[in-house]
Amino acid sequence: MPDQTVLVAIDIGTTKVCVLIGEVGGRAGSVDVIGIGQAPSDGLRKGVVVDIDRTVQSVAAAVDAAERLSGLKVRSAFVGISGSHIGSQNSKGMVAVSSRQHEIQRDDTLRAIENARAVSIPNTREILHVIPRGYVVDNNAGVRDPIGMSAVRLEVETHIVTASTTSVQNLSKCVQRAGIEIDELVLAPLATAEALLSDEDRELGVVLCDIGGDTTDVAVFQDGSISHCATIPMGARSVTSDLGLVLRVTPETAESLKLKQGTALPLKVDPDEVIQITSIGEDQPRPITRRHVAQIIEARTAELFDHVAREIEAAGATNRLQAGLALTGGGSLLTGISQAARDQLGMSARVLAPDGLGGLTDSISTPPYAASSGLLIWGAKNWTVEGEREGGGRSLDNVGGRIAKIFRGLMP
Ligand SMILES: Nc1ncnc2c1ncn2[C@@H]1O[C@H](COP(=O)(O)OP(=O)(O)OP(=O)(O)O)[C@@H](O)[C@H]1O
Ligand SMILES: [Mg+2]
């Protein structure tokens, strides 16, 4: 059996931690899932770690489950990060083409990207990603792949994603204390996009919306790459708590009501359809209309899509996203949500489940696993094991470890 590379993804969500172990290269370029682990998560608020001990426990439990399923020991992982502390800015980098024939080499592009990285950011923040958006070769803008072209001067336009250093440290601590090294902290929507979006979607313009428990990650892709991202501090659990408050029912009752009877489209519900609910402190159920439940849900989804519209505006992408809205995350499973989005935002909308992985995908080919699936694909696309190309590889009982960044896959 040829040596294979094993990568690990950890998605630390506000409702669950999900760990995926993937084997890269079984078939050409493919990633096969060979381990899955999940544990409830309750150490985050609005997407940011507020209780390290509880989060460590969740990560450890999810890792443990994935290790038992795969029979492998996890040493390092790709970890998703998001939250309202994420910021981004554009930056240019310029270099003189170094070779005597003035033919652009990979090294020139790397130096240009390195150059773009030298922006001033506050000392409370750090750079997560420097994403090349396009190159200017001498005076010709809009070049996607400049390697091999002849030029004197190479300029790169990049999108720089930054994060609050303390949020990065707290998230990192949770992973490290669970005994796992971090291969890379990856902006969650960038990873998620790998499992959902085609190159064409990104080219046409698309807004990715991952509706999780307490947060909704929004990322706008235009002209092939990410142009804006934000985290909205509300999600599917906000719908549950609204139902709990308005109908005075327990969180469990509210959740089950949402999952079994909920819809974001009250007008599609028969106004006479009645359901029985038991409020807190009462022993007799009382009748309410299912349409009323839908109206409570609709109020929240409308507020959420209002925020999404504002982010699209902030990206300068209003009326420019031909591939529309791509919904994912557990919240995208709410009945009627894509129709509600279409009606409100006036653009096409679809619910997407992760795609592109092989192996044990039966239980993870659904929207809540878009981020963890995307992290595995991101890892396989952007990283290689050191020495792998010399035929080294690693044995499968030693998962994760020393890997070297390759710049393949960063360009759209
Ligand atoms: N069929 C469904 N209908 C409506 N909501 C659903 C459905 N299935 C799951 N959800 C909701 O999805 C939410 C969890 O989504 P998900 O697993 O994507 O969150 P997370 O990744 O843990 O959180 P986050 O992305 O905010 O960090 C829960 O609030 C749950 O109620
Ligand atoms: Mg999530």
Image: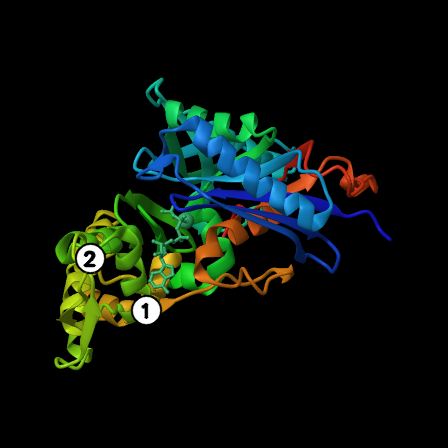
Rate crowding at label 1 as few (under 14), some (14 to 19) or many (20 or more) other CA atoms within 10 Å: few
* Point 34% across, 49% down: residue: 213
Tag 2 near tag 1, CB within 8 Å: no
Residue that label 1 marks: 260
Residue 20 circle label: none
Tell me where residue 359 sits by quadrant: bottom right
Closer to us: 345 or 263:
263
Closer to the camera in the image, 181 or 221: 181
Q: Image point 63% across, 34% down: which residue?
A: 76
Considering the numbered disc 1 on the image, is that residue within a helix, a strand or a loop?
Answer: helix
Residue 54 in sight in this render: yes
Query: Distance between the Cα atoms at labels 2 and 1?
Result: 13 Å
Task: Tell me if the residue at label 1 has its CB under 8 Å from ligand 1.
Answer: no
Q: Amino acid at mark 1?
A: Lys
Left or right of 411 in this view: 237? left
Q: List x then y, in percent, for residue 38.
A: 53, 48
On whether ligand 1 comes within 8 Å of the CB at mark 2, the answer is no
Looking at the picture, tell me which residue is in the foreground, 360 or 200. Answer: 360
Secondary structure under the numbered disc 2 in the rendered image: helix
Residue 351 is situated, as x and y percent measured from the top left of the image, at: 38, 67
Question: What's under tag 2, amino acid-wise?
Answer: Leu
Q: Earlier in the sequence, mark 2 or mark 1?
A: 2
Q: Residue at x 19, y 53 (%)?
A: 280
Residue 186's x, y, as percent?
49, 39
The residue that mark 2 highlights is 243
Question: Which residue occupies 42% across, 59% down?
Answer: 202
Farthest right residue in view: 1
From the viewer's perspective, is residue 263 above or below residue 6?
Answer: below
Q: Is residue 334 left or right of residue 70?
A: left
Classify 25 as above or below 266.
above
Q: In the displayed structure, does residue 361 sit left or right of residue 139?
A: right
